[in-house]
Image (cartoon, helix red, strand yellow):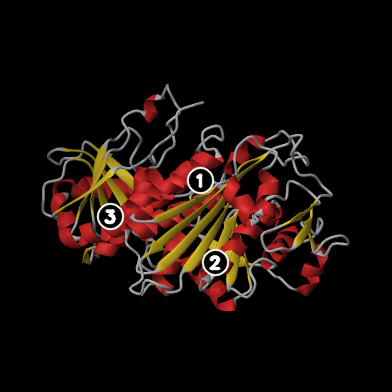
Amino acid sequence: MAKSADAPSGALKIAFQKPDADVSGVVVALAGPDLAFGPATAAAIAPAREALGRAATAERFKAAQGSGFELLAPALDGVERLIVVGLGDGKEPTDWVKLGGQIRGKVASGATEFTVIAETAEGALAAEAVADIALGVRLRDYAFDVYKTKKKDDERGRLAKVTFAVGDEAAAKKAWKLKEGLAEGVELARTLVNEPPNVLTPTEFAKRAAALEKLGVEVEILGEKELKKAGFGALLAVGQGSVQESKVAIMRWNGAKEKNAQPVAFVGKGVIFDTGGISIKPSASMEDMKGDMAGAACVVGLMHALASRKAKVNVIGAIGCVENMPDGGSYRPGDIITGLSGQTIEIINTDAEGRLVLADVLWHVQDRFKPKFMVDLATLTGAILVALGVDNAGLFSNDDELSERLYKTGLATGEKVWRMPMGPEFDKLIDSKFADMKQTGGRHGGSITAAQFLKRHVNDTPWAHLDIAGTGMGSPASDINRSWGSGWGVRLLDRLVKDYYEE
């Protein structure tokens, strides 16, 4: 077995200094239209101003957000490279997190340090904006390379430190401390998705979740003995063809002033590897099925983020970790199983396994913890990619208010969701001749009938299902992500909790 990555990669140091401090090495200056700089920036780069003007004209620099150019060996003491990055035309608000990623992209690989003079033409940036830029830099810098024993030249000398010249050091440090845990949470989720399945077994995944105890999260691990006793029949059916023991991890963060305050809850699908079982998948790209636990990875990363900033809310995070393998003991099409809810389920296709895992965990959470709402995340259906592509997660819900909040938060964070229809006409498609329900509803509306299946396991609890098959893994590179595992959903749900549910 290969060694594991014990900690997220990309944990570069973020530092702060006064705006009038000397800058050296690689320096980033932020510019508005007409090459407008802030006062501290203008003073620091004054000797190179004429050269910058000529370069801006040659590059046709219009200050569009993220655009830029650089001067090598400018006439500035100690400065090796001066990089100018555009802030935008001022007509649209600047996306500071995205700008941070764009800045990191302008600094060529191989640089070990650089300094950002954090101001616009109007003056020093607010501490929150600086922290967001730092977050974007760090997320863009993440790389999962723990298993590479030979590295290319451009992978040597990884970025180690970014310094921000800011107007208020204390405020910037405080703002970053709150965002640092979020960065760690996203990195943790990415690392979990990127790990190979021979390392990240269900047992190892549960162990990684249990590591959150060092942040004050209470973690309970249920093994197969406990799961059988409790009646997790649907989840255990999925894992019964594997030599790996199925696990459920229940994570509790108690941050509300009132100890017994009603919690919010997040549930993740943790199918560590999905062969499809007896309904086996084609071999092409099956290696990607190591990422079929991206929903569970998000929940673990989210719990890390919330605990790191000591969120003032009670939160339940629950993940079901299984491996779906073909074996003489595997569950079969045609089987009828009984889930934790007591409802019977006719198995149509063993490759529709994630909904079975989620059904039992959702039922357990709503029955045991009585949350204000539940949001589940799952790389559930290929059909959602056909419907929405890779830029939006599918949103299915029984609650309009929760849906609207998720939609608005998605726009604010860039982790966008699009609400899909549900209703009786779809629900009847999963009625079974032999059991209480079928596990699938056929080819048409596949993502919707999967959501209808989950809805039968949440009772009246406000609930939203996010199908992240298009966003959780293998999505195209972005300004803040160059990793196969995206960590999608951590920023979205952290912001949802912060904006709507914290005391």
Query: Which one is earlier in the sequence, the residue at label 1 or at label 3?
Result: 3
Looking at marks 2 and 1 on the same chain, the residue that comes earlier in the sequence is marked by 2
Front residue of this view, candidates 499 and 108: 499
Dot 1, crowdedness within 10 Å: few (<14), some or many (≥20)?
few
On screen, residue 182 versus residue 274, left or right, reads left
Residue 378 against residue 292 in the figure, above or below:
below
Residue 224 lies, with reference to residue 459, above or below; the image says above
Q: In this view, does 1 lie to the left or right of 152?
A: right
Q: Tell me, for residue 47, which label it has, or none.
A: none
Tell me which numbered mark, 3 or 2, is placed earlier along the sequence. 3
Residue beneath label 2, please?
Answer: 368
Q: Nearer the viewer, residue 190 or 455?
A: 455
Which residue is painted at 22% across and 67% down in the image?
122
Q: Residue at x 60, y 37 (%)?
A: 244
Is residue 64 visible in the rendered structure shown here? no
Q: Which of marks 3 and 2 is in front?
A: 2
Q: What residue type is labelled 1?
A: Ala
Q: Which of 267 and 262 is in front in this view?
A: 262
Q: Label 1 to label 3, Cα distance in Å?
A: 24 Å
**Helix, strand or loop at disc 1?**
loop
**Residue 314 shows up from this direction:** yes
Image-quadrant location for residue 19: bottom left
Front tag of 1 and 3: 1
| Residue 130 shown left or right of residue 453 in the figure | left
Q: Position of residue 132 (x, y in %)?
A: 33, 58
What distance separates the C-alpha of mark 2 from that of mark 1? 40 Å
Identify residue for label 3.
30
Q: Are marks 1 and 3 in contact (CB under 8 Å)?
A: no
Q: How far apart are marks 3 and 2 (CA)?
A: 52 Å
Mark 2 element type: helix
Q: Position of residue 137 (x, y in %)?
A: 34, 48
Query: Badge 1 is on which residue?
Result: 477
